[in-house]
């Protein structure tokens, strides 16, 4: 197994700080990474006023209407 330079540095730093072995340092760093939670971003639906109301209960009809609007531009 080969560790990237930044990871190997973090492992060595932890080993010296806590006076622990290589495996224990790697395991601690991996566990810390597994516990980390990515930041959740709120989903925001963007809308655009098209000047027309579309009944979406009939998808084919709505698509035809929207396609016609696109071609009229």
Image (spheres, rainbow, N blue to C red):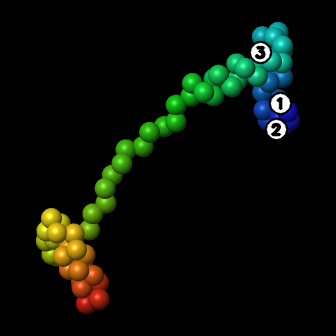
Indicate left or right for 32 with 24 as reference: left
Q: Position of residue 45 (x, y in %)?
A: 31, 56
Tell me the quarter of the image containing the N terminus. Answer: top right
Dot 3, crowdedness within 10 Å: few (<14), some or many (≥20)?
few
Q: Is 65 in front, or is 18?
A: 65
**Disc 3 element:** helix
Decide which of tag 1 and tag 3 comes sooner along the chain: 1
Asked which quadrant contains residue 21, the reply is top right
From the image, tell me which residue sits under label 1: 8
Tell me the quarter of the image containing the C terminus. Answer: bottom left
Indicate left or right for 72 with 5 as reference: left
Dot 1, crowdedness within 10 Å: few (<14), some or many (≥20)?
some
On residue 24, which mark appears?
Answer: 3
Q: Position of residue 23 (x, y in %)?
A: 80, 18
Do callouts 2 and 1 mark residues in contact (Cβ within 8 Å)? Answer: yes
From the image, tell me which residue sits under label 2: 4
Identity of the residue drawn at 52% across and 31% down: 37
**Disc 2 element:** loop
Q: Is residue 45 above or below residue 51?
A: above
Indicate left or right for 5 with 30 as reference: right
Identity of the residue drawn at 83% across and 18% down: 22
Q: Is residue 38 above or below residue 10?
A: below
Q: Is residue 21 above or below residue 47?
A: above
């Amino acid at each position: 197994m080969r560790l990237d330079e930044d990871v190997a540095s973090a492992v060595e730093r932890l080993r010296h700080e806590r006076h622990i072995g290589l495996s224990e340092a790697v395991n601690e760093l991996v566990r810390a990474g597994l516990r980390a939670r990515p930041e959740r971003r709120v989903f925001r639906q963007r809308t655009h006023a098209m000047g027309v109301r579309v009944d979406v209960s009939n998808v084919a009809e709505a698509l035809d209407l929207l396609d016609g609007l696109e071609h009229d531009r």
